[in-house]
Image (cartoon, rainbow, N blue to C red):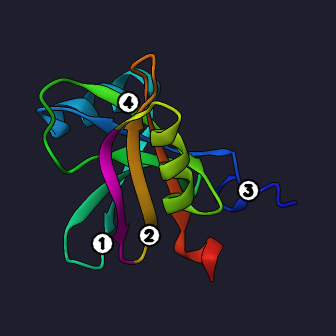
């Protein structure tokens, strides 16, 4: 079993902030927590702002505006589609059906029966 969260089924492996004003959110966390924010180029030409701890990204700021600020935790899983189906069958509300992000992996979001949002991810490097 790997000790690397991005490769270990069930391990939390990424955090992502969602906000109306991503630049303001990034500035807030840079000031409060001393985070270094790096521009991470995506394969589609977009820029994703990553939260760096040392030389490694541990999360980021969503480029898509949200109605209200929130944090989403990503959990590494062995099969996003199968685990998403299990979550929905167990009473989860689907928020984002499974989808692929080139250069990153496959992911999905749901709200559990208590309303808490969680994201599932299988990284491309994990399934390679």
The answer to whether one can see residue 58 in this image is no
C-alpha gap between disc 4 and disc 3: 21 Å
Give the answer, above or below, for where 55 lies relative to 24.
below
Q: Residues within 10 Å of mark 3 (few under 14, many from 20)?
A: some
N-terminal-most mark, 1 or 4 = 1
Foreground mark, 3 or 1, reads 3
- Mark 1 and 4 residues: CB-CB less than 8 Å, in contact? no
C-alpha gap between disc 3 and disc 2: 16 Å
N-terminal-most mark, 4 or 2 = 4
Compared across the picture, whether 21 is left or right of 126 comes to left
Q: Which residue is mark 4?
A: 71
C-alpha gap between disc 4 and disc 2: 19 Å
Which of the 4 image quadrants contains residue 3? bottom right
- Mark 2 and 1 residues: CB-CB less than 8 Å, in contact? yes
Picture disc at residue 104: 2
- Percent of width and height locating residue 28: 28, 25
Give the main secondary structure, helix, strand or loop, of the magenta stretch. strand
The residue nearer to you, when weighing 95 against 9, is 95
| Residue at 53% from the left image edge and 34% from the top image edge | 90
Q: Which residue is mark 3?
A: 8
Q: Residues within 10 Å of mark 4 (few under 14, many from 20)?
A: some
Picture disc at residue 100: none
Q: Which residues are magenta?
A: 94-102
C-alpha gap between disc 2 and disc 1: 9 Å
Foreground mark, 2 or 1, reads 2
N-terminal-most mark, 3 or 1 = 3
N-terminal-most mark, 2 or 1 = 1
The residue nearer to you, when weighing 106 against 90, is 90
- Mark 4 and 3 residues: CB-CB less than 8 Å, in contact? no
Which of the 4 image quadrants contains residue 92? top left
């Amino acid at each position: 079993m790997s000790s690397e969260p991005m490769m270990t089924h069930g391990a939390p492996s990424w955090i992502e902030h969602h906000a109306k004003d991503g630049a303001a959110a990034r500035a807030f966390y840079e000031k409060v927590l001393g985070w270094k924010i790096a521009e991470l180029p995506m394969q589609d030409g977009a820029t994703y702002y990553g939260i760096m701890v040392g030389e490694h990204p541990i999360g980021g700021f969503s480029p898509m505006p949200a109605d209200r600020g929130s944090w989403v935790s990503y959990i590494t899983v062995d099969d996003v589609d199968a685990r998403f189906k299990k979550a929905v069958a167990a009473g989860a509300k689907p928020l984002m059906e499974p989808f692929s992000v080139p250069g990153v992996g496959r992911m999905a979001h749901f709200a559990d029966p208590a309303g808490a949002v969680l994201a599932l991810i299988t990284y491309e490097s994990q399934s390679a």
